[in-house]
Image: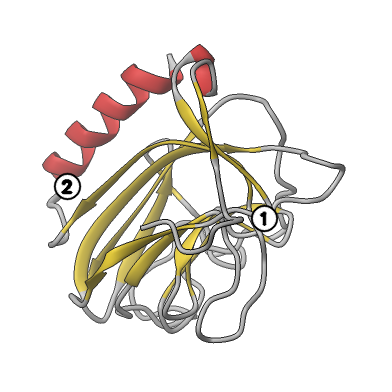
């Protein structure tokens, strides 16, 4: 659902890798009308951060209802916070790269634990690579209403996203490893190579 008359992301016929994408310029947001209440899920997103207007990218993929994010936040990439704490936050931090092509991010939540990936590789958590269940931040939060483009969530976080999203897949369960690898291979072959 488009939630605001001025919040109009644009359709790009030749966006990410010359293929279609939806571009968010920091003033746009798309919010799902469906709330995702499960604690077990898998989410994939294909996108790239963009330097639009000389401003760092914020949350390109997040939640309207809470502090859930995947991929980009605060000018960084390779971050994930599925609900109640960071599960991916690299040390040292990784500044978001602009217009360099798409990245495939995914997060699988198993209830109390979650794992995040970029291009099929587990992301690190404050130097612990990969993050392991029980280490550091919490997980297992629900997504609520998925939001693309940032904006303001109900938790009061304002961090507009700037970039392009080409594909989003949401599963209502945590995929097993073989399934995760298959979906990741499909997305990478379609968008990255």
Pick the quarter of the image with the N terminus: bottom left
- Viewer-nearest residue: 38 or 145: 145
For the point 43% across and 84% down, the residue is 84
- Horizontal side of 153 relative to 82 (left or right) equals right
Q: Callout 2 environment at 10 Å: few (<14), some (14 to 19), or many (20+)?
A: few
Number of marks in picture? 2
Secondary structure under tag 1 reads loop
**x and y percentages locating residue 52 in the rendered image:** 77, 39
Q: Callout 1 environment at 10 Å: few (<14), some (14 to 19), or many (20+)?
A: some
Q: Going from the N terminus, do you reach mark 1 or mark 2 first?
A: 1
Q: Is residue 106 above or below residue 79?
A: above
Q: Are marks 1 and 2 in contact (CB under 8 Å)?
A: no
What's the CA distance linking mark 1 and mark 2? 37 Å
**x and y percentages locating residue 29 in the rendered image:** 53, 56
For the point 67% across and 58% down, the residue is 58
| Numbered tag placed on residue 98 in the rendering | none
Q: Nearer the viewer, mark 1 or mark 2?
A: 1
Residue 96: name its quadrant.
top right
**x and y percentages locating residue 178 in the rendered image:** 13, 40
Pointer 2 residue? 177
């Amino acid at each position: 659902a488009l939630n605001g008359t001025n919040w109009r992301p644009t359709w790009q016929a030749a966006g990410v890798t010359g293929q279609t994408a939806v571009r968010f310029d920091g003033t746009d947001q798309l919010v799902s009308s469906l709330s995702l209440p499960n604690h077990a899920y898998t989410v994939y997103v294909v996108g790239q951060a963009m330097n639009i207007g000389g401003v760092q990218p914020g949350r390109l993929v997040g939640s309207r209802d809470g502090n859930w994010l995947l991929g980009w936040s605060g000018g960084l990439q390779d971050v994930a916070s599925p609900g109640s704490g960071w599960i991916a936050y690299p040390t040292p931090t990784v500044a978001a790269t602009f217009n360099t092509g798409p990245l495939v991010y995914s997060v699988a939540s198993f209830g109390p634990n979650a794992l995040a990936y970029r291009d099929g590789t587990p992301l690190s958590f404050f130097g612990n690579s990969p993050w392991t269940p029980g280490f550091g931040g919490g997980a297992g939060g629900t997504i609520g209403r998925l939001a693309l483009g940032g904006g303001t969530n109900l938790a009061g976080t304002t961090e507009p996203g700037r970039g392009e999203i080409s594909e989003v897949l949401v599963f209502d369960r945590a995929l097993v490893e073989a399934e995760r690898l298959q979906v990741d291979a499909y997305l990478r072959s379609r968008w990255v190579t």
